[in-house]
Image (tube, helix red, strand yellow):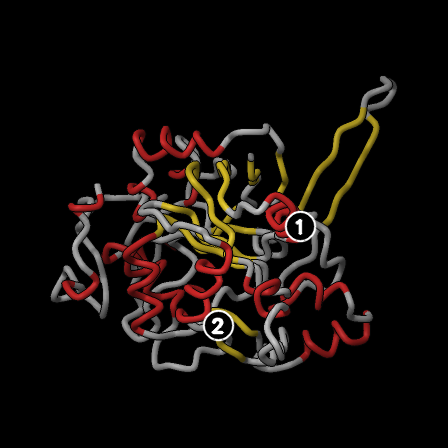
Amino acid sequence: MAHKIPKFSELPLDKNGPHHNAWGLYGKDDQLGTLNRLTDDIVKAASSEIQTGIRIGLDWPLDAQKDIPLFGRQAFHKEVYQKTPRIVNDDVWTFNTQSSTQWDGFRHFGYQKEAIFYNNTTLDQIHGTNGVPATNTLGIGAWAAKGIVGRGILLDYHAWRLAQTPPPPHNAFETGSISVADLRRVAEAQKTEIRFGDILLVRSGYMQAYAALSRAEIEAVRAKQPLTFTGVEQSEAMLEFLWSNFSAAGGDHPSWEAWPTRREYALHEVMLGGWGMPIGELFDLEALGRHCGEVGRWSFFLTSEVVNVPGGVASPPNALAIF
């Protein structure tokens, strides 16, 4: 598979499309993007990561942000009711798929200036407007048939940063960038080999910072316009790093990348709209980081089964790291 992937320098593939796109690589009707990299052989090889059987969940609770989720999203609501007269209970959940741990699907974020999504999909096709019937094209339910399964790696930037003398400055709630150079230093310090098709997770330290905030402080963060977060940098080097190595990428905070973007483009539009590369956000990487540090291994078998909703925009990952 690796030799069939064009070099980053060869993008865009569709010369009539926006910058850095890989449209048409897997066909004009492709629904999987870089998840096509998770071939049977790559998944089979990843199974060698299972050595002890220890399993660590990576999903934050759906109600973790309580009634004040960021980006103005709706809060999780749970209704538990008895089906009288029987001693039987049912429940109903109502929630925004991006108010807790999530995979961003390809319908979530397109090229902003061009108003176009992966493989030249339009807003009209998604919403059924201007005489165009709505379709389930690019819906996250298309991922459910095989899930997101393969070799995961954790680049624990937070632990690496704190080990430096002095630690580089970092504020989870201000716009700041984690560079490619630092991510490579993290991998080197951990002795973590990066393999083609890996699922990348970056621990920035957001969860610890968020847990230390009072409600009033969270409300102040939420009220900022625009919201600001530290995440991976927007750069050609970062794009090349991601394109050349990974099938999906995510982290522990709400925006994945430095927010707002510090460039004329966002990683979201290139990764989701250009390549079809899933972006994970608000992954709970605290227990994973502790275990990796204890055993001295930052690679694992990762399994994630999205919710099978045709035409869905995003989904809880239902993710496990297995050692």
**Percent of width and height locating residue 81:** 81, 33
Are the residues flagged by discs 1 and 2 in contact, CB closer than 8 Å?
A: no
Q: State the residue in front, 149 or 47.
A: 47
Q: Mark 1, residues whose alpha carbon is within 10 Å: few (<14), some, or many (≥20)?
A: few
How many marks on residues? 2
Which residue: 62% across, 34% down? 55
- Quick one: label 1 or label 2, which is nearer the N terminus? 2
> Which residue matches tag 1?
290
- Tell me which amino acid carries mark 1: Arg
Residue 131 in view of the camera: no
Q: What is the quadrant of the C terminus in the image? A: top right
Does residue 61 lie above or below 74 as drawn? above
Name the side, left or right, on which 79 lies relative to 161.
right
Kind of element beneath mark 1: helix
- Tell me which amino acid carries mark 2: Ile
**Percent of width and height locating residue 120:** 23, 58
Does residue 140 lie above or below 190 as drawn? above
**Percent of width and height locating residue 45:** 36, 31
Residue located farthest toward the left when viewing the structure as drawn: 15
> Tag on residue 144?
none
Which residue: 77% across, 76% down? 217
Q: State the residue in front, 35 or 244.
A: 244
Q: State the residue in front, 77 or 42.
A: 42
When asked about the image quadrant of residue 73, the answer is bottom right
Q: What is the quadrant of the N terminus in the image? A: top left
Does residue 96 lie above or below 71 as drawn? above
Q: CA distance from mark 1 to mark 2?
A: 21 Å
Which residue: 32% across, 66% down? 239
> Tag on residue 178?
2
